[in-house]
Image (spheres, rainbow, N blue to C red):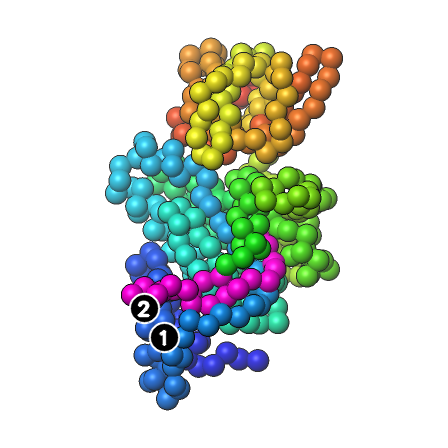
Amino acid sequence: MKDDPAKEAVRHLQAIIARETGAPLDHAAAMDMEAAVARACGVQPLDASDFSFVRREVTIVLADLRGFTAMSATQPAGVVISMLNRCLGRMSEIVFRHHGTIDKFMGDSIMVLFGAPLEHADDVKRALACAIEMQVAMHALNDEHLAEGLPELYMGIGINTGTVMAGKFGSAAYSEYTVIGDEVNLASRIEAFSLRGQVLISETTCQRCVDYIEVSEPMEVFVKGKAQVVRLRELLAIPSLDLRVPRQEIRRSHRVEVKLPCVLHAIQNKIVLPYSIKGRIRDIGYHGVLVELDHGLDVHTDVKLEFDLHLVDYHASDIYAKVVKVGQDADGYFAGLEFTSVNPDTNMHIQLFVQLLVAAQ
């Protein structure tokens, strides 16, 4: 069933604006444009003073750029803004193509709704296809960045489906259409667990289209505000659309055994904690390390890491990573870390270090 002509026209206009300016109109401006288009089509626009809300099921997509803060500290402001606008503009086009609604931009993050304010019977499927296409687009963007000598950027995406309160919130002076509720908070928590290039979805989202998607085995995580563990899955592909998350290819690299002393600092609420944790790197690859520790770390802990690469005469620092697996053996505790942010110079030296050791084997 087709959307009404006014809504369809607004969506096309938003896509054009996003393409030409790097960002879509905000909610207030979009509502003004929708009212103008509705009047031009002979449709009575909704009352802008209506602050009522409804409970409805929506699928929330939260996407966050990994490594953007670190890149901002090393690149000129003009380059940073240009890269951010290019990225968000590309993501906006994908969102509108799948009939999603951009709820808000939050710095280097974007929140997208499927099911509000417009509902479609296949909102969950649209959201999942949108998320995979966003990761495919990031892969293509990084090819462009490399060709231009710019640093790579990665995106982590979290998706949840549930009932929220949707409507116009605020006052007569300022208001905006948005959604609120526990399911929105859970989507944010899921996104925080995602690694670069990854799409994580809630069990609720998965169950809405279990025969439509290819996913990983479930993982259980503890989420702030939830008494019980939350089950998540990694979205891998939508076979019927020939869509596949390119992350698996990005993560492939040689891994070599080493014995490198290292220092870790845990991160909480995006703050690097002052106390240090000493460890030894057991093996290293382009995108992560396996570290031996005297004390265990929890899965999904964010850390800052530094170590010396004597073979290439380089001190690797300002490496940010997430603990993706933990264990214990005869040598003590160990933790598998996947890098979430590495500056281009450090990334180059890590790859050179690994390649030299591979060549020497």
Label 1: which secondary element: loop
The structure residue drawn at horizontal position 51% and vertical position 25%, both measured from the top left corner, is 266
Q: Residue 210, percent across and down?
A: 72, 58
Q: Is residue 161 left or right of residue 52?
A: right
Task: Compute the Cα span from label 1 to label 2.
Answer: 7 Å
Name the residue carrying label 1: 49
Q: Which residues are magenta?
A: 159-179
The mark tally for this picture is 2
Label 1 with label 2: CB-CB less than 8 Å = yes
Name the residue carrying label 2: 172
Inspect the image, locate mark 1, and give the three-letter code of the amino acid beneath it.
Ser
Q: Residue 179, percent across and down?
A: 49, 61
Comes first in the chain, label 1 or label 2: 1
Please tell me in which quadrant of the rendered image residue 173 appears.
bottom left
Farthest residue to the front: give it.
171
The magenta stretch spans residue 178: yes
Does residue 185 lie above or below 77 as drawn?
below
The structure residue drawn at horizontal position 40% and vertical position 46%, both measured from the top left corner, is 108
The structure residue drawn at horizontal position 59% and vertical position 34%, both measured from the top left corner, is 300
Q: Residues within 10 Å of mark 2 (few under 14, many from 20)?
A: few
Label 2: which secondary element: loop
Q: Is residue 175 left or right of residue 101?
A: left
